[in-house]
Image (cartoon, rainbow, N blue to C red):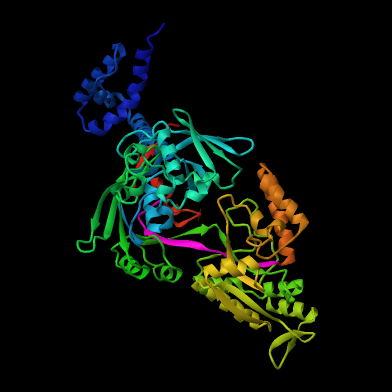
């Protein structure tokens, strides 16, 4: 059998010759003969040619062979280079890397960075969110999802929840997170000596240990917001069990906390005279149980009011701001150093018609005309500088069942005029008001004494006046709204927002069982078919059935014009243009904008996939 290595070496000598030719084309005839002799030694060799033999190969090739070999070699080099870049390009990815710092301005000053108390302060809630972690956490895409909990199960009657916690979760002092910590935290919330504002929410819950990594919660009755309650931060029992409940608000752990979240307390700076905290720095926790965090250090600076913080943002003394009013957001939209972020709140603002009032609002044609003469886009542009999302129904864009094709209402004042004319509401040319059977088309529009709502009310009044409808605006504070207006349904028309819980269930707003005093069916709307659809949407586990039910319910409700759906408020804030991964499509509360802070990053690096 022939020696394949010798045969191969003989064949390649002609190709290799072209390489050497680039360096030996000026050789003398005698040196070429020497080169040939060197090359011919390859025939009888039992090994690959030496470097010296490679260099002498060109001497035995013709000029034509040299040209062919040179072209072939060039093609091989180009093809190899291209292939290399293709392989690198398909397998190489840019991924987050650890590094960078960020400075954000907050309004107020930290007092109790403690999950038992932080719900009453936006500043405390912000810091608690990134230092502590709960069994569950808020996620813009998934809603409530697992955090310290690795998994959970729910009993068939929805009165028992069982959680298994992660094995790798640690406190910032590197002690492991235990079931004892969870039980201690829930008991502390329920203990009246701690005076936690969360105590009422946890009053009908009992908690017990199943095994080393499993904890069980028993409820007296099913709760739609139980998983939302489980987002409360967990306290380290090995630290807090030695602190008397009566002294819980006095301990330094409320300012220099030890949690299990993505960031740990590093340092703070106080005013030398007043003792007020001026800045607060946290560092990434290296032993965090999830991916990230990536930003090395975050510093929060505290300001007494929005205007002072906004000036600091404009001067770039801070890179971001926790909340930005609409008018100020519009002022810095062109600042290349700042990103304006918006997260949709779980709320829709509407004009609700009281269908039980003894006014002309009971006439569906009147409600329809008012709907078609309400210029939503103008309201959003002028009151919110375009920073609000127009709504056509009570289903938010992030909810199952959302559709842009639900309602036929558009701004059409001429059509609204025709509707009222045909309904017998004739315009009195002398008074400029519409009348029917000596009754004037006049209503009271009630709203909260909030600046934005008052501005919206004034615009609605102006738009309806062009149709010949007279509106008197009545503003009330939150206390009066709850104790008088809503309790007795004492309004013709109500401009207000309805806020969803995390379950995003519209049942409480539109089911006929919710028209009683203290309930939230603000339009006093009743429809048996709608009731059945809302019940189906609430009970089904099939998402498609839920979507179909909600879409049909929306069509029926919109056809009755019980409300004018205006806009979804947006929570607006500013962050550095260097920050990536900070988008939150929706949030339940302001601190939720930080719930994915472990995914934020400034630095990047290249990574190669294995496939």
As drawn, 272 above or below 204: below
Q: Is residue 140 visible?
A: no
Q: Tell me which secondary structure the magenta stretch mostly adopts.
A: strand
Which residue is rendered at x = 28% and y = 63% of the image?
Answer: 317
Where 498 sits versus 540, above or below? below
Residue 415 in view (yes/no): yes
| Front residue (pair 170, 92) | 170
Tell me what residue is drawn at x 40 percent, y 58 percent: 121
Which quadrant of the rendered structure holds the N terminus? top left
Can you say whether 445 is above or below 57 in the image? Answer: below
Q: How many marks?
A: 0
Side of 342 relative to 390 (left or right): left
Q: Is 299 included in the stretch rendered in magenta?
A: no
Tell which residue pokes out farthest to the bottom in this image.
430
Q: Which residues are magenta?
A: 562-581
- Inspect the magenta stretch and tell me whether residue 572 lies in it: yes
Looking at the rendering, in which quadrant would you find the C terminus? top left
Residue at position x 50%, y 62% in the image: 570
Please state which of residues 220 and 77 is positioned toward the viewer in this rendering: 220
Residue 580, image x, y percentages = 39, 51
* Image location (x, y in percent) of residue 536: 71, 47
* Residue 209 position in % (x across, y down): 47, 31
x and y percent of residue 517 in the render? 65, 62
Decide if residue 343 is on the left or right side of residue 104. Answer: right
In the foreground, 436 or 386: 436
């Amino acid at each position: 059998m022939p020696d394949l290595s010798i045969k191969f070496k003989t064949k390649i000598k002609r190709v290799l010759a072209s390489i050497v030719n680039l360096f030996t084309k000026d050789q003398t005839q005698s040196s070429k003969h020497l080169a040939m002799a060197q090359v011919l030694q390859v025939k009888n060799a039992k090994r690959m040619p030496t470097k010296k033999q490679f260099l002498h190969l060109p001497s035995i090739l013709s000029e034509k062979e040299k040209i062919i070999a040179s072209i072939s070699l060039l093609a091989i080099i180009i093809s190899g280079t291209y292939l290399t870049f293709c392989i690198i390009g398909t397998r190489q990815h840019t991924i987050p890397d650890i590094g960078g710092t960020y400075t954000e301005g907050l309004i107020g000053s930290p007092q109790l960075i403690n999950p038992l108390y932080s719900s009453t302060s936006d500043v405390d809630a912000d810091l608690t969110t990134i230092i502590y972690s709960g069994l569950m956490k808020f996620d813009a895409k998934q809603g409530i999802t697992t955090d310290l909990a690795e998994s959970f199960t729910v009993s068939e009657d929805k009165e028992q929840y069982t959680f298994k916690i992660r094995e790798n979760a640690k406190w910032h002092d590197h002690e492991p997170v235990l079931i004892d910590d969870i039980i201690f935290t829930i008991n502390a919330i329920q203990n009246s000596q701690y005076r936690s504002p969360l105590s009422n929410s946890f009053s009908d819950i009992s908690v017990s240990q199943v095994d080393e990594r499993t904890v069980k919660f028993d409820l007296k009755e099913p709760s739609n917001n139980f998983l939302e309650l489980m987002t409360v931060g967990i306290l380290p029992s090995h630290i807090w069990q030695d602190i008397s409940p009566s002294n819980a608000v006095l301990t330094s752990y409320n300012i220099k906390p030890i949690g299990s979240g993505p960031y740990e307390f590093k340092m703070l700076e106080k005013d030398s005279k007043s003792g007020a905290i001026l800045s607060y720095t946290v560092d990434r926790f290296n032993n965090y149980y999830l991916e990230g965090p990536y930003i090395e250090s975050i510093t929060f600076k505290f300001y007494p009011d929005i205007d002072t913080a906004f000036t600091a943002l404009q001067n770039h003394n801070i890179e971001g701001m926790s909340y930005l009013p609409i008018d100020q957001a519009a002022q810095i939209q062109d600042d290349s150093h700042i990103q304006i972020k918006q997260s949709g709140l779980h709320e829709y603002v509407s004009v609700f018609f009281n269908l039980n009032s003894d006014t002309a609002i009971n006439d569906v044609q009147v409600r329809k005309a008012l709907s078609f003469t309400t210029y939503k886009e103008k309201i959003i542009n002028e009151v919110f500088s375009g920073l609000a999302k127009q709504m056509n129904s009570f289903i938010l864009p992030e909810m199952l069942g959302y559709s842009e094709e639900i309602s036929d209402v558009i701004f059409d004042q001429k059509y609204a005029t025709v509707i009222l004319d045909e309904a017998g509401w004739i315009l009195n040319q002398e008074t400029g008001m519409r009348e029917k059977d000596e009754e004037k088309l006049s209503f009271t529009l009630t709203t909260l004494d909030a600046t934005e709502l008052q501005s919206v009310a004034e615009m609605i009044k102006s738009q309806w006046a062009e149709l010949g409808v007279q509106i008197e605006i009545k503003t009330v504070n939150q206390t009066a709204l709850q104790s008088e207006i809503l309790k007795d349904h004492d309004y013709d028309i109500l401009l207000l927002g309805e806020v969803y819980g995390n379950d995003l269930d519209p049942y409480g707003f539109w089911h006929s069982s919710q028209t009683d005093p203290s309930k939230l069916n603000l339009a006093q709307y009743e429809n048996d078919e709608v009731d059945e659809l809302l019940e189906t949407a609430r009970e089904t586990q099939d998402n498609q059935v839920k979507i179909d039910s909600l879409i049909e319910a929306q069509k029926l409700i919109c056809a009755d014009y019980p409300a004018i759906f205006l806009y979804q408020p947006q929570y607006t804030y500013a962050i550095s243009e260097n920050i990536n991964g900070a988008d939150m499509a929706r949030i339940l509360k302001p601190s939720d904008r930080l719930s994915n802070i472990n995914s934020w990053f400034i630095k990047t690096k290249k990574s190669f996939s294995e496939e």
